[in-house]
Amino acid sequence: MVDGSVDVSTGGENVEGDRPADEPEAVTDETTAHGSGVELERTIGLVGGLAIGIGTMIGAGIFVFPGLAAQHAGPAAALSFVIGGIVALLVALPASELATAMPRSGGGYYFISRCLGTSAGAIVGLGLWLGLVFAAAFYLVGLGHYVVAVLAEMDIVLDLPVQPAVVLGLVVGVALTALSVGGTENTAKLQNAIVIVLLVILTGFLTYGSLDAFGVFGRVTAPEAFFPRGYLPVATTAALVFTSYLGFAQVATVAGEIKKPGRNLPLAMVGSVVVVTIFYAVTIFVATSSFGAERLGTFGETAMVEVARELLGLPGAVLILVAGLLATFSSANASILSASRSVYALSRDALLPEAAGRINLRYGTPHVALGMAGGPIAVLVATGQVELLAKVASYLHLVMYALICVALLAVRRRSPDWYDPKFRVPGSPLLPVVGAIASLALIPFMGPVPIVIGTVIMVLSLAWTRYYAGTVDLKGDI
């Protein structure tokens, strides 16, 4: 058995989050994940889990993608978001069952490696880490665009030799990584507050926008064809915007820090997908009703600011600018946290060097893993390639989602003694099969470049595992 594994029959990990009687109240030195018996403390409740899921997904879907999506698919971009939400829900249910049976940090990597073996785990292990890195970089570039837009409203123009949005994204990325080192509880509290403010702002704005679109305030909205560019762009746009739905899987990557995981994990994962899908569809409806898809597409990453300006004037634009900053900030915040937990899980299984799993027990955080997340994120932010970053992140996650569904089928078929989930997927085995097929079906619509980059990452991940871990088999090692 690989060092750091937990025997569920003896309660190796404190599943319900109660502090053991003999655990010291404060610890000041460091240890590593390998063979130390040390686990991350369970400090995240249901609200925190929902905040990680919703906070990650609400950012890109509402504040970065509407203009880009409308440019590709017109008003039918709303359908693209619904398709993405359905695929995410088909995977969130199987992932919830696996998470309640194996509530450990690492999420999809942990489930797949324990149910399908090291090779399958390797494909998504380093891939999940880098997929989250690509996603975080995408969110940070979007955040940079919103900061630039805020400064523009104040007549401040940054004259820099590179894109100002890239520089600002780099600065915030470094700051968020440093914040995460200070403790997961601090990060979760910040995430909770941001998400609550976001949902209040968006609910009010989208309610007003919907009433306006239906002519309640006397303005007539010109009708527009729902499929102005045909049906194929709906699928390609669904592949593009699927990055918006990575948040539910990020809840699973911090499963080892969720209180009462048998109850809170399924509620957080499924609930966050349902909530944000509704928000996405309404957002595209309001946005395309305000301007029409063609014009909306010209506004790029900050299209929602112009929609708010059209509906509510300058106060509306300022309100959405603030909300956009909060949303992209929360998405990046959750992604950095989740990426570091993926590194921690890989180190715990000895698939990365021992130092990568080192924990500073003063804060209870894997600070080396956080550095291994923040560093590559900074490199990718520097590229400024919004769509490419989004598609590579989506590709890597879709492969993992398909394997999560396969993992559920495999473990149910074997039915090992340790497998005792507190939540079971309804409609199995049909639902996991449909989830796997739906996940893979989106991949061809992403275009060749993201697929090539993602495939290279997975091949290198497998090669690294063969070189570094040899013949270690994690299948059934719980």
Image (cartoon, grey):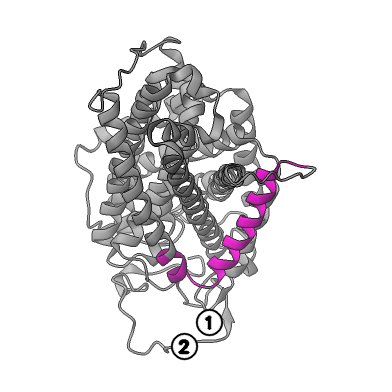
Instruction: Tell me which residue sits at (46%, 88%) in the image.
Output: 26
Which span is picked out in magenta?
162-189
**Residue at disc 2, secondary structure:** loop
Residue 138 appears in view: yes
- Relative to 79, 468 lies left or right: right
Q: Position of residue 163 (x, y in %)?
A: 71, 41
- Relative to 308, 356 lies left or right: right
Quick one: label 2, few (<14), some, or many (20+) residues within 10 Å? few
Task: Specify the label residue 2 is tagged with.
Answer: none
Does 36 lie within the magenta span?
A: no
What amino acid is at disc 2? Answer: Ala
What amino acid is at disc 1? Answer: Arg
Task: Specify the label residue 26 is tagged with.
Answer: 2
> Where is 157 relative to 337, above or below?
above
Task: Examine the residues drawn in magenta and state their main secondary structure.
Answer: helix
Task: Specify the label residue 362 is tagged with.
Answer: 1
Quarter where residue 387 is shown: top right
> Where is 109 relative to 296, above or below?
below
Quadrant housing the C terminus: bottom left
Camera-nearest residue between 434 and 155: 155
Instruction: Tell me which residue sits at (33%, 12%) in the image.
Output: 223
Q: Position of residue 47 (x, y in %)?
A: 30, 60
Q: Position of residue 446 (x, y in %)?
A: 53, 25
Camera-nearest residue between 176 and 154: 154
Q: Position of residue 448 (x, y in %)?
A: 61, 23
Camera-nearest residue between 314 and 271: 314
- Relative to 412, 197 lies left or right: right
Instruction: Tell me which residue sits at (51%, 56%) in the image.
Output: 333
Task: Answer whether labels 1 and 2 touch (C-beta < 8 Å).
Answer: yes
User: How many numbered marks are there?
Assistant: 2
